[in-house]
Image: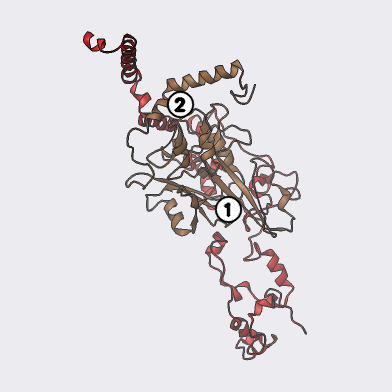
Chain colours: A brown, B red
């Protein structure tokens, strides 16, 4: 079984699969809706947080993360992310800063004994964990590039993927500067962190925030002045990843080292 | 109508008819045959949001456990694991809340479980309780010594040396062994909670060291400390550019 339905190249089977996919997209209306979406003059979502409306944000306290990978486990259980170690909606990276100025970054593996690689290495200046996830940008590049309008931003600022219209073209995966997307091998559609939209719309916390043992992850409404999220923003020096790209991420980092940007 | 077509050569007239027919069919398909949700991307998005919201929840949330397991909940509330959600260790338990008798959450008893958080890893924040799982009571289950719902360290951590062991060891064999850390550093309480965000103060001036080591030093406790003339002794430098304060070696 080839990994991709198009792996057959020019064979009849490949063309047949392609045509089947093409017509199923046409029937689902994804292409039509996507083409027509440029016609109505729709207000640009994400320009300003609307008042009286939830506008969700996420906080990560880097110096609390112990790299236990409970969040990665919880995310996989909650969101039916494939168990293979290379599909993630959220993941944790280990940064190793060496005395000669080089930095190594490696995503840690869940359910694996902590690596002894750093234990007795005298060349290491500092090493720490940085949890990462979809930044749910206020002006998301992935929404701009989606040719069929399958990726969109909800009113509360969460970027979602419409599984029914996504054609799996991987354009959004390329466009995301944070590498937060992957192609789900089962549905062949783009998948990403949704802030656990099914949980937060019922008043629960995202699964990774729920299980984080050290409260390194904070979640809440940015419009609410009294939420733990607002307190997190007030009490810490806040950085976002790649601020120069003007994607306006809504995942805020506290105590972020200058090396991580 | 007939006159209208007579103005064109016959092939062109046929072509116009065919094009008109195609236009009518095309408009019919777009306006009538294609259903509205297919054309309206806003409706597609609203459907996607509804689908997303309807997905099943697997983690029940930290509040739901206390409704039945109130004794454990109370025990946990005051211990070091007070901030942990039950599902951090016991896994997703929404099924258990709906059918408590038949669906049981996992109870992680194997020895490999606790080290996921508590094994020594230099990347972890300093001060986080860590052990070496290879030499720390091998073959014994963690729960045989520690109650997971109210874990206690074997000894209460001493003030600074629990995290700053290297400095404490150096100071223990230096002339400054008698000095408390707080003699020179003011440590805000918040430093123990978020060690990197709130840092202890450090002395900034030569005069601070001069309180004991200056010729006119006022500190009576330090009357045997080596004295220098602050005005003459290395006046261009602050003291710790030459002397490491935790182990101040001086030429005799």
* Subunit bearing disc 1: A
Query: Label 1's element?
Result: loop
**What residue would you read off at disc 2?**
A164
* Subunit bearing disc 2: A
The answer to whether any part of residue A240 appears in the image is no
Q: Look at the picture and state if A239 lies above or below A78.
A: below
The image quadrant of residue A90 is top right
**Label 1 to label 2, Cα distance in Å?**
36 Å
Residue A81 on image: x %, y %: 56, 33
**What residue would you read off at disc 1?**
A260
Q: Look at the picture and state if A175 lies above or below B226.
A: above
Q: Residue at x 55, y 29 (%)?
A: B103
Closest to the observer, A72 or B70: A72
Residue B151 on image: x %, y %: 61, 51
In the rendered structure, the answer to whether residue A198 lies left or right of residue B148 reads left
Closest to the observer, A66 or A184: A184
Closest to the observer, B85 or B141: B85
Are the residues flagged by discs 1 and 2 from a single subunit?
yes
- Dot 2 surroundings within 10 Å: few (below 14), some, or many (20 or more)? some
């Amino acid at each position: 079984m080839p990994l991709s339905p198009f792996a057959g190249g020019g064979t009849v089977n490949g063309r047949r699969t392609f045509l089947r996919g093409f017509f199923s997209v046409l029937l689902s209306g994804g292409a039509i809706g996507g083409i027509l979406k440029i016609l109505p003059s729709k207000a640009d979502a994400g320009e300003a947080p609307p008042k009286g409306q939830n506008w969700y944000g996420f906080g990560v306290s880097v110096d609390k993360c112990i790299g236990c990978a409970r969040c990665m486990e919880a995310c996989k259980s909650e969101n039916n992310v494939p168990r293979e170690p290379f599909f993630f909606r959220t993941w944790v990276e280990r940064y190793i800063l060496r005395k000669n100025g080089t930095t190594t970054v490696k995503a840690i593996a869940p359910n694996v004994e902590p690596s002894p690689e750093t234990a007795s290495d005298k060349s290491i200046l500092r090493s720490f964990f940085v949890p990462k996830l979809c930044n749910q940008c206020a002006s998301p590049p992935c929404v701009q590039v989606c040719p069929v309008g399958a990726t969109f931003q909800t009113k509360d600022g969460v970027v979602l993927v419409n599984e029914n219209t996504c054609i799996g073209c991987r354009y959004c995966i390329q466009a995301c500067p944070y590498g937060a997307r992957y192609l789900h091998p089962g549905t062949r559609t783009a998948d990403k962190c949704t802030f656990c939209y099914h949980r937060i719309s019922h008043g629960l916390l995202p699964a990774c925030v729920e299980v984080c043992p050290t409260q390194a992850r904070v979640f809440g409404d940015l419009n609410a002045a009294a939420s733990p999220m607002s307190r997190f923003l007030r009490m810490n020096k806040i950085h976002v990843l790649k601020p120069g790209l003007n994607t306006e991420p809504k995942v805020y980092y506290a105590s972020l080292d200058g090396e991580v940007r | 109508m007939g006159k209208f077509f007579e103005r064109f050569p016959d092939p062109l007239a046929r072509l116009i008819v065919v094009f008109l027919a195609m236009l009518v069919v095309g408009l019919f398909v777009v306006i009538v045959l294609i259903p509205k949700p297919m054309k309206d991307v806003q409706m597609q998005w609203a459907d996607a949001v509804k689908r997303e919201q309807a997905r099943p929840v697997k983690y029940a949330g930290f509040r739901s456990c206390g409704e039945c397991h109130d004794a454990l909940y109370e025990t946990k509330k005051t211990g070091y694991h007070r901030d942990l959600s039950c599902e951090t260790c016991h896994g997703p338990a929404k099924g258990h809340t709906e059918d408590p008798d038949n669906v049981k959450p996992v109870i992680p008893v194997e020895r490999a479980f606790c080290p996921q958080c508590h094994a020594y890893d230099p990347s972890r924040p300093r001060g986080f309780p860590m052990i070496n799982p290879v030499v720390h009571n091998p073959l014994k289950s963690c729960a045989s010594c520690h109650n997971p719902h109210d874990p206690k360290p074997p000894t209460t951590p001493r003030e600074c040396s629990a995290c700053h062991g290297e400095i404490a060891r150096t100071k223990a064999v230096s002339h400054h062994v008698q000095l408390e850390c707080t003699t020179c550093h003011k440590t805000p309480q918040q430093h123990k909670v978020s060690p990197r965000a709130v840092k202890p103060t450090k002395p900034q001036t030569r005069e601070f060291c001069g309180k004991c080591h200056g010729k006119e030093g006022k500190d009576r406790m330090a009357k045997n400390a080596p004295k220098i003339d602050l005005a003459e002794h290395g006046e261009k430098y602050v003291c710790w550019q030459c002397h490491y304060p935790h182990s101040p070696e001086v030429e005799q």
